[in-house]
Each structure stands twice: as structure tokens, then as C-alpha cells.
Amino acid sequence: MNPLSGREFSPFYVMELVRQAQEYEDVVHFEIGAPDLPPPPGVRRALQKAVESGAFGYTESRGLEELRRKIAEHYGRRYDLDLDPARVIVTPGSSLAFLIAYEMLAGPGDRIAMADPSYPCYKNFAAMVDAQPHFVEVGAEQGYLLDPRSLEGVSRLRAVHISTPSNPTGTLYPPERLRALALWCRERGVALISDELYHGLVYDQREHTALEYSDEAIVINGFSKSFCMPGLRLGWMVVPPGMVRMAEILAQNLYLSAPTLSQYAALEAFDYDYLEEVRQTFRRRRDWLHGELSQILPVSAPPDGAFYLWCDASGYCDDARRLSEELLRQVQVAVTPGIDFGRNGTKRALRFAYTRPIEEMEEGIARLRRFFS
Ligand SMILES: Cc1ncc(COP(=O)(O)O)c(C=O)c1O
């Protein structure tokens, strides 16, 4: 008997690559999608204090009130929005927020639109609620962005799910497109889910949240990327007022409460001077890697944010997965092959993460030059 009742879940190839990379010494890592910088200094102190004060119980399912208030204030500071903390639900990583959103919005046979390529877990969360992912192919011609025009006529469409800036392409939705999507969704009673986990890591433009354009949008964010706290497993979602209770009930059932120690630590995460240093560090790395890498492989998506460059390896191979295995075997450079992120143009794509210092990336680029010459 199939224990998954015929549902299909795809594995994360990059995790296998990370495992393979451990078998080699002296690997240069371009595959890791997590920041290498420490969290804001106050976070460590708050965590220690929480341990000493014995904060080992559950919290309220929606999360500590003080943390939800600070998250709401963050929307005031960053986007000039007045957000009611009652609409914030704290989650164990942003990952569980997707599950809550999908559980609330879609059931068997319903469709959730998402870009191809996009973050691989979205389609797996759709499978968990027996919904169908509706993949919209986006490439260089579409600027790697979803356009409302490509969504017309999709039957049983319950939600449109975007990520801005995107993993794997690093592309940011400009305000006009975000507004157009938000309005299109609102007019048709379709939910807009905006994954804004990489906000804070946008380099040349102002970032906009979908909440600026619609109170009906579900916005998901967290502490794993720009706050440099991935292992504390903490995220949040902002839901429309009418969905708060349902989201709370799902949170109670799925995880009771997000990790308590992490929530206390996160109270000190909104250290804007430090967060700006983090952003500048990643910006320098992006500029450097983009300059170097484009002499070897075309970078096909505009690297607006997050910490990824999406590259076209078709000049060298038909199968980027094989290429990534050869890179690891021959020159000990670990890179993520595109196939993790969908089917559209992914077979010959590679995703480079700039999550290591420039000195390490210099060695990686030297090895790549050797390999490709
Ligand atoms: C676009 C995107 N969304 C969500 C996640 C989930 O992260 P977490 O559960 O650590 O918040 C990731 C992780 O890499 C991601 O890249």
C-alpha cells in the first residue's frame, strides 16, 4: 500500500548535494541557501536570558503578544503601514505558514497558481491539501514574474502564490506588478499569497509588501534570511482580519506554538543598524559575484534581491544536474542545479548562492574558470 495515498512529493535535490559535498574536503559552497552571518547581537543575549529564566513552556498559539506587536511595528517602519498585531500569527519557520495558508484556501481539485521556476516546497504543500499546483512558465521574456493576464481562465483557482524577491531567481516584483496582481486577485475572490521572506535583502530598489495594495493578501515572512536566524525556526504570517481565527485554530492543531525560546530571542531582532550592515554585506557579495560569474556563465535573471544568481549553463551542458556533480567531483565547487525549482528552463540552469565571504568565492571562481576552460 502506498502510505502517501498516491500523492507525490518531490525531494530537495540540493539537500542531497549538501550531503555529497560533505564527502569532500575543501569544498567551495555556492549551494547553501542560508546566511552565514550571525543574528543581531541582542538576539543571542535574549536567547541566553530566556534559557536562564526558564522559558520552556508553550506560548499562545498565535505567538507572544509582544513579538506580534514588534512585527506589526516593523510594517510601520519598513512600509509605512499601520498593521493591527491581531492579524499576525507567529509560525515555526515561514514553512508552516504556507501550510496554514493552503489549508485555509484550497481543497481537493482546487488550483494554486505559482511560477515555474519557484521555491520547490510550494507544490509539495499543495499536494498536502490535495490541491493542484498551476504552474505558470516564466522566463527572461517575462522578467521571471507572474502577470495577471496569464491567469485568466484558470478554473477553480483559489490562490496565486508569488515570492518576492524570488528563490531561485532573485527577482523582485515592482510595485505596479504587485498592485496589478493584488487587484486582479481581489476582484475575482482569489487569494494572493506573497512570500516576502527575503525582504531586507533587496539591493537597488525599495521593496514593497503586497499589504500595501490589499488587506486581503496573505503575507508570509520570517527570521531565517535577512535576520540571520534560520536555525531558530521562526516565521510569521499576516492574514486578513476574517481569517485570523481559522489560522489560529490551524496553528493550535499543527504545532501548538512556535518555539518559545526563539520567540523571546526574536524580540531583539529588529536592530535596524545591524540589519542594514547585513544587507550591505550581501550587496557587496552580489556585486562581486555577478561581475565575476557573468564572464563565465550568463546570469539570466535580474539579481534584485535574496542571495541567488540564476545562471544559464546551456553553453556547457544539456543536464545541469550532471554538471553540478562533475563540478563537485572535479574541482570541489558545490552549486545547485535548476531542476529543484521546476521544469521550465531548469534543466540547463544553475543557482549560485552568495552566502559565503568574497575571499571564499574568489577561490570558487578560480576553480570554475579552470573547469570551464
Ligand atoms: C522562498 C522561500 N520561502 C520559504 C522558505 C522557508 O524558510 P523558513 O521555513 O526557514 O522560513 C525558504 C527557504 O529557503 C525560501 O527560500
Image (cartoon, grey):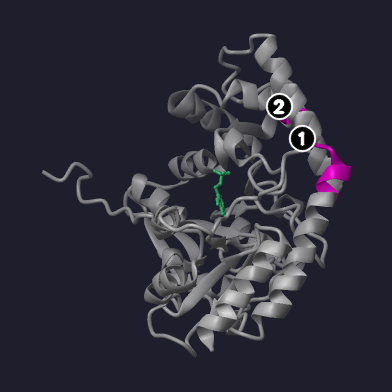
**In the structure shown, which secondary structural element does the residue marked by tag 2 occupy?**
helix
Asked if the magenta segment contains residue 271, the reply would be: yes
Q: Residue 318: horizontal and vertical position, in percent?
A: 39, 85
Residue at mark 2: 265
The residue drawn where x is 80% and y is 40% is: 74
Which SS class for mark 1? loop
Question: Is the residue 312 above or below the residue 264 in the image?
Answer: below
What residue is rendered at 57% in x and 42% in y? 94
Residue 269, labelled with which disc? 1
Q: Relative to the observer, which residue lies in front, 21 or 221?
A: 21
Of the 4 image quadrants, the one containing the N terminus is: top left
Where is residue 253 drawn, in percent x and y? 44, 25
Task: Tell me: 49 left or right of 55.
Answer: right
Residue placed furthest toward the top: 53
Using the image as rendered, state which of residue 191 and residue 273 is in the foreground. 273
Q: Residue at x 28, y 54 (%)?
A: 8
The question of residue 199 being in magenta is answered with no
What kind of residue is marked 2? Answer: Ala
User: Over which residues does the magenta segment extend?
Assistant: 266-276
Q: Which residue is at the far front?
A: 25
Counting every numbered tag in the picture gives 2
Q: Quadrant of residue 24?
A: bottom left
Residue 140: name its quadrant: bottom right
- Image location of residue 211, percent across then percent down: 72, 50
Q: CA distance from mark 1 to mark 2?
A: 7 Å
